[in-house]
Amino acid sequence: MQRNILIVASNAGVRESLGRSLRQRGFQVTLAMSGAEALRMVRSVAVDAAIVESHIPDVRAEQLQTRLREARPGCRIVTLTSYGLARATPELLALGPGDYIIREENLLSLLDGPVEESGNGETPDNGSTALIQTIDVLVGLLELGDRFFGGGTHQAARLARTVAEDMRCDTMTLEEIVLATLLRDIGRAGLEPAIRHVDGGYEPGEMDRMKQHVNGSLRLLEHIDFPWKILPIIRHHHESYDGTGYPEGLRGREIPIGARIVAAVDAYVAMVSERSHRPALPPSVAQDELMRQAGRQFDPEVVEVLLRVIERRRTAIDGRQRPLVLIADRDEEFRNLLKMSLLNEAIDVEAVGTAEEALNRLVSSPPDLILAEVESESSDAFRLLEEIRGDDALRHVPFALLSARDDRILKVRALRQGVDDFLLKGSSLDEIVARLENILVRETARREGSLPKRRGISGHLEVLPLADIVQTLAVGQKTACVTLQNGHHTGTMWFEEGAIRHASVEGKDGEAAFYEMLRWNTGEFLIEHNVTTEARSVGQDAMFLLMEGFRLIDESQAMASPQARV
């Protein structure tokens, strides 16, 4: 288990020194420069221990300790006074025999002790898992008859879980994110149908009423004593990374990490789903929109991870938004359960009772996958398979068989006749759905070939200038590599926890390279998160570099003006 340590210090040097030492020991580190920021962090990130500098400008250390423990019960808190601070203050004279000096390496040894396991630890909790799965099923049933929102919550929860896992969120935070995703929009039930399914764009008054669904969700949930901190995620999942969202206009790391993940996932699922006022967008268009809004509406690191997750889960075929599966099975109850499970995964379903009905449907609506019940070697499912394989227009449609019994002879015959899979009804619905998804993914790869994988977040400097990129990464305290292309010129800079550590461009390193790239008004950029370098050529704060760079640009422009040459 990777433990997360919060460092609260107003001095950047103290934060970075302690943070570097902790990371070298395998800890995950979260940095905060004030008490207010520290409290926001612990509400959105599971923190095991906190190192608090004794002199924080906006709050007394004792008060901050109390508030941190209230926000994260069980969190270890150590208050320290750095020697650099102590030697410059007369309070040092008040130290007595009950006060001690501890070296950094000894402090790290104290934090390296075992973590007491509790209900909030990493130990799997079957009760928690069952509760989350039950809520997932109930929300899915509520959405089942909704043409526009059916299955959307489950799709968002699954995406959010995978993004959180890829971002290495701890178990508690991951569960908070999944549960918040499932419950984020339950307040929508209190809105009148005309607002939920408005035709065309929202009028200002309608948009204000639509925004109230967040408060509705919070009112329904605020009296429930959840073991997870899901309310902050629900409250802030409509905040924008640049501070233009609602309800509080939070920006950057002020927004809980769970809310940042849900915001991007929620937007993507909405874009690729049909709405009353517009058709569903193709996945590629929705992904491009995510990239355009990275650093503005969405956390750019979350967008980068989400795009990777989407690439891994692609099942759309021939550019359609949702693949279609045709099921032929006499058991109506089983058909309906499987249909609900597939709809939850953004897969459309046509369900019939017999192979003959399936053949009639094939003529009018060719599916992307056929799943037929098989009972014996004389089953109609084999005749349906022969019909399809003999039709030039349908012969490439994937075909899977579904049996109530594990018959080895039946399975071997089916596989020899070219079925894509042989499934058992006794398997869990999750397993059946996963195997059907694998068939769709393979078919997508076969038809479309190997598609180039996206790298990071890319775009044009005309749309997102370097100054905006720097501010975005600094506010979010991101670790990333930024590559710029301006004509035939290429430049690169590395960020660590929001600070620029190294910059290089064709014969120049350090601040001179940064100032050169700041002049590039056209070209392309690529941001790749969590990419580091050992090189160090920049020592100044990112905001200082921006201000100094703009000053140099203004001076050079002034010198080049006609008035300056007179």
Image (cartoon, helix red, strand yellow):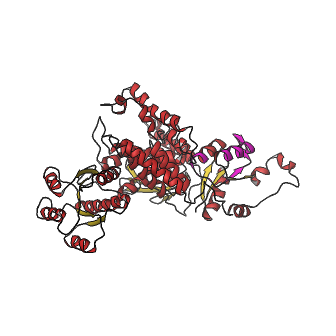
Position of the N terminus, as image quadrant, is bottom right
Relative to 441, is 469 on the left or the right?
right
User: Dividing the picture into quarters, in which one does residue 454 lie?
Assistant: bottom left
From this view, report whether residue 254 is shown above or below residue 436.
Answer: above
* Observer able to see residue 327: yes
Residue sticking out furthest to the left: 391
Q: Residue at x 67, y 49 (%)?
A: 9
Q: Which residues are magenta?
A: 42-70
Q: Residue at x 39, y 43 (%)?
A: 267
Where in the figure is residue 236, as x and y percent of width and height?
A: 51, 40
Where in the figure is residue 202, as x and y percent of width and height?
A: 36, 29
Count the labels in the image: 0
Relative to 39, is 206 on the left or the right?
left
Where in the figure is residue 555, as x and y percent of width and height?
A: 50, 41
* Observer able to see residue 510: no
User: Dividing the picture into quarters, in which one does residue 119 lie?
Assistant: bottom right
Q: Residue at x 36, y 33 (%)?
A: 196
Which residue is nearer to you in this view: 436 or 203? 436
From this view, report whether residue 336 is shown above or below residue 251.
Answer: below
Q: Is 50 included in the stretch rendered in magenta?
A: yes
Q: Is 502 included in the stretch rendered in magenta?
A: no
